[in-house]
Image (cartoon, rainbow, N blue to C red):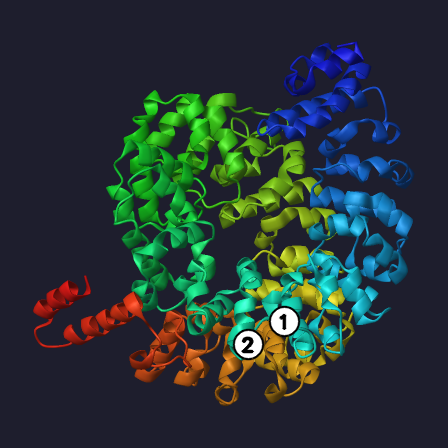
Amino acid sequence: MANTSTVYRLGLLVCFFDNVQELDTGEARSLLHQMIKCSRLKGFQADVKKLKAQLLGLVLSSQRLNETLDSISDAIACLSFPQLDSLSTESVRSAAAVLGTVRGWTPGQTLILADKFMGGNKQLSLFNLSRLGILVPGVSADTLYNTSPQDLAQALQRPLSQHGARLSPAQRLAVVTQIAASRNVSSVLDLLNSTFLKELPLYNLLHMTSYNVSHLDQKDLRKSQALFLYHLVSGTMPVQEILRCGQLVRGVTCDHLRALDPATFRQLDGLLRGSLSLLSPLQLNCLAQKYRQDAPDLMPPLLLVTLPVRVLAMAPRSICKPLLIALGRVELSSIVPQPAKRGEVMESVLWCLNYTIRDEYDVDILGRTICYLSPDFIRTITSNKVLNEALIHFRICRNLSPAQKREVRNKIQQYYGDPTAWQPELMQDLGPLVTLLSREDLTTVAEKFPDILLQLALDVEGTAVSEDFLTAVFHALKRTIGTITPSNLPPGCGGTRTPSSEHILKLADANSHWSAGELRCLSPETFIRSVELLGALTSFSMAQLLALKDKAKEVWGPVRSWRKHQVRALGHIALSLNQSEIRELELGSTDTVAALIRHRQWSPPQVRSLLEGFLHDSGLPVDALAGWDLAGLGRLLCVMTGPELDSVSTAAYSIAAARVGELACEAQVLRRLLRKAREVFGDLGQWHSFVLWEVGTVAAGMSGEELKLLDPDLLPYFTPAAMAILPTHVFKELSPEQLKKLGPENSAAVTAAQEAALNREQLAGLQAARDGGDSNETPLSTAPLTGSAYRGEMCFLLWAAFTAVYFADYCQILAHNICT
């Protein structure tokens, strides 16, 4: 190991070195530099991190941290909060070129290093932004806003564009606001990349009178932005040119499509086909209706499923293959949001397959649609060839129902046999399907392959898995590395099983199985190194969270002494803070509050305490809050009093309208915010589709009278979130005509309580929206259908008529014979 070339030639084998005690400082440093490549390994990251920490400890045993900061490779990400906190500003600045390129920093580490780098400065230069690199997310929104617009504009070409996705909405909005204030809107649109462009307020765009939309090619747009920009140029620019401008197609409305003459529409067929993946279910449905009316011979098969199911049923069998191929390439729920209709579409899919999957080709043609097969149909699959291919495809399914999971589990055992006979290669091939096994089978594989199960736990981290799987992972850890009882345990913890930081890293979501007593007995070092991993878990009970809060007090001191990186690191653990403890926190930073409020389980009194703490510690009155402050405060707006909401500045709301429109506040709060929206966008009668989409859930603050007066063509541009929180007594004021216009997404968002309040005519309108029917379409009796389509339409009418008469059973048989 003394020979550097030998270390280099080991390649990825350096990641498995296990004789650290035999190395000297120089050899340890040489090995650390080669371990950068270990991030390429699919697994083993917990072991790699442990090895890096051991080597780093050896290097630091003979050299001060400040002196070696820029020479210890990416192992520096293993440093704990106290170690990073001990660094001097000078050493951080001198090593910034290295620090800003290291991947793997946690949010808390990023915050410490950015603060050290800033050294009390409240402004950044382009040079310093570039040096910060990957540490930019640790810079506050206020500091980013205070940076000169010229430096920000240049930084967008590299450091900000590279790391913008890791910034919070408040940080991105602060950057966009500062830049937008210094130049005209057209140049802002040209300058911003997709990540920042989507934060540009609609209010800024409304001042435009023209724009060369070809500059938007390859850029992402928010829905309201696309709607406005399409509206802006649709009168002056050929539709062919508009549709070539990237995501601008997302702004096409049903009215725009209906207005196209048949000849022009047929010429657009190629462009429209290439844009299907960008369109919403509403747009796909309107496009399907247009094809059906003006170019039925050109209709892409995928669009058939957005129309009423009876139309799909009329299609000839020759459409089956292209239809199945098209459906297999998309996520069915993204184009058919209504569960009941998805079931009907899947019935047509099975009809195309003659209600059987014959071979691997059928499985392949199903593609992603396999995730929507009913449990009963999955049960019918018996062929080994089909099962082998089907199980491969089921790995991509992330939202199987419990009944589907049960049938897939049965098929795994049917095909692969008893898990007691499985080999490790099979376990790795099955991947996420292992999580579907029963408790008994998981216990078996945990005994045989604990390491593979632990790696799988890291691979599926953050996805919904069974409690049985997490239990098996927890016990697999105990079998593979046992438990260690540190010597520096708190009083009363003698003999208690306590996890190490290595245990916690390997367990991932299965850490929820540590008892409150075990968590309370964590060693201080383990808590410091693991607090952000534990704080990221959402499955802890309140007893476990309280134990971790007590541990934080023990390690960090009283709540009033906690620093912002420590508060940020708590994550979900902060939910255990009571109101008096929340008031003791340092909450003067929008970024700190924004990080805390992301957790959804806060109670209203806790949220109110967070708001009061922020207003007190920041020294800002409500009327002084900037737009990015409103975006960062999030749910805190929902607990503002009436006078506080009224004092929110119009300018701030205009900047944050899209973010405020994501909040599901109480009705009285939404009514207050709706007043603010009127001040910005004018009276409701003046609103266009893009304004309604921009204000989002705030539109749910409308009264029943206001809703009744709304143009039915605007109803599809309520966001689904807004539709779902419309009070029932307001929702029932919608007319049948308005309900017909809701569109697929909004009709799917209607709640059971809202639906129960509707009368028969309203329910018919709602069902028409869910079916995907067109209120403007020609009646069936005169519809321009020919050949098999005409026969299918007549069969539908016969079936409906015969099943309504007294001799229903007999006539169903008769109708079936006629139709087949």
On the image, the x and y values in percent for residue 350 come to 29, 52
**Contact? badges 1 and 2 (CB < 8 Å):** yes
On the image, the x and y values in percent for residue 22 come to 72, 10
Looking at the image, can residue 275 be seen?
Answer: yes
Instruction: Point out the tag, 1 or 2, that comes first from the N-terminus.
Output: 1
Q: Which residue is labeled 2 in the image? A: 260
Query: Quarter of the image containing the N terminus?
Result: top right
> Dot 1: what SS?
helix
Question: Considering depth in this image, is 195 or 54 the residue closer to the camera?
Answer: 195
Query: Quarter of the image containing the C terminus?
Result: bottom left
On the image, the x and y values in percent for residue 818 come to 16, 66
Q: Which residue is labeled 1 in the image? A: 239
Vertical placement of residue 136 versus 795, above or below: above
Neighbor class of circle 2 (other Cα within 10 Å; few <14, some 14-19, many 20+) is some
Place residue 492 in its image quadrant: top right
Looking at the image, can residue 662 be seen?
Answer: no
> Going by the image, does 357 lie left or right of 184?
left
Question: Considering depth in this image, is 108 or 231 the residue closer to the camera?
Answer: 231
> Dot 2: what SS?
loop
Q: Amino acid at mark 1?
A: Val
> Going by the image, does 98 lie left or right of 426?
right
Place residue 293 in its image quadrant: bottom left
Question: Considering depth in this image, is 787 or 343 the residue closer to the camera?
Answer: 787
Vertical placement of residue 555 versus 146, above or below: above
Question: Considering depth in this image, is 590 or 817 the residue closer to the camera?
Answer: 817
Vertical placement of residue 333 versus 789, above or below: above
